Amino acid sequence: MDKYVLFIIDECTFCSQAVLLLEKESKSYKVVDLTDTLSTRAQIKMALNWTTFPIILSRDGKDLKLVGGYTELKEVIG
């Protein structure tokens, strides 16, 4: 099971950097591309109270926890 879930959009520098960081650190992740789903994008942003992309979640068993964006991911991974 993937440790991280990334909600991303096209042409997002921080989205690309988050993927590269997870690959560099050999962390498992799943990417959910929301580029073409504006209504879903808005719903996820509202539900998680996060306004920018990427939106990164970490998985602990069946639980998902909001990490934040790229900057917060860097802090968590070290």
Image (spheres, grey):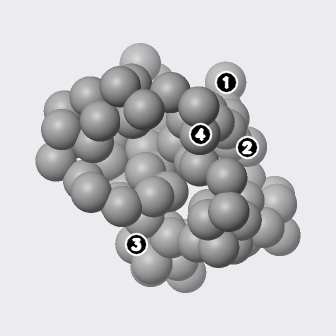
- Secondary structure, mark 3, is helix
Circle 1 residue: 1
- Secondary structure, mark 1, is loop
Circle 2 residue: 28
Q: CA distance from mark 1 to mark 3?
A: 22 Å
Circle 3 residue: 72
Which sits in the foreground, 16 or 4? 16
First-in-chain label (1 vs 4): 1
Image check: 17 left or right of 53? right
Task: Give how far across and how far down residue 38 sits, in percent.
Answer: 42, 32
For discs 2 and 3, the disc positioned in front in the rendered view: 3
Local packing at callout 3 (Cα closer than 10 Å; few below 14, some 14-19, many 20+) is some
In the rendered image, is residue 64 in sight? no
Q: Residue at x 32, y 47 (%)?
A: 66
Asked if the residues shown at circle 1 and circle 3 are in contact, with their CB atoms under 8 angstroms apart, the answer is no
- Amino acid type for the residue under numbered disc 3: Glu
First-in-chain label (2 vs 1): 1
Circle 4 residue: 35
Image check: 55 left or right of 11? left
Task: Give how far across and how far down residue 6 sits, in percent.
Answer: 56, 45
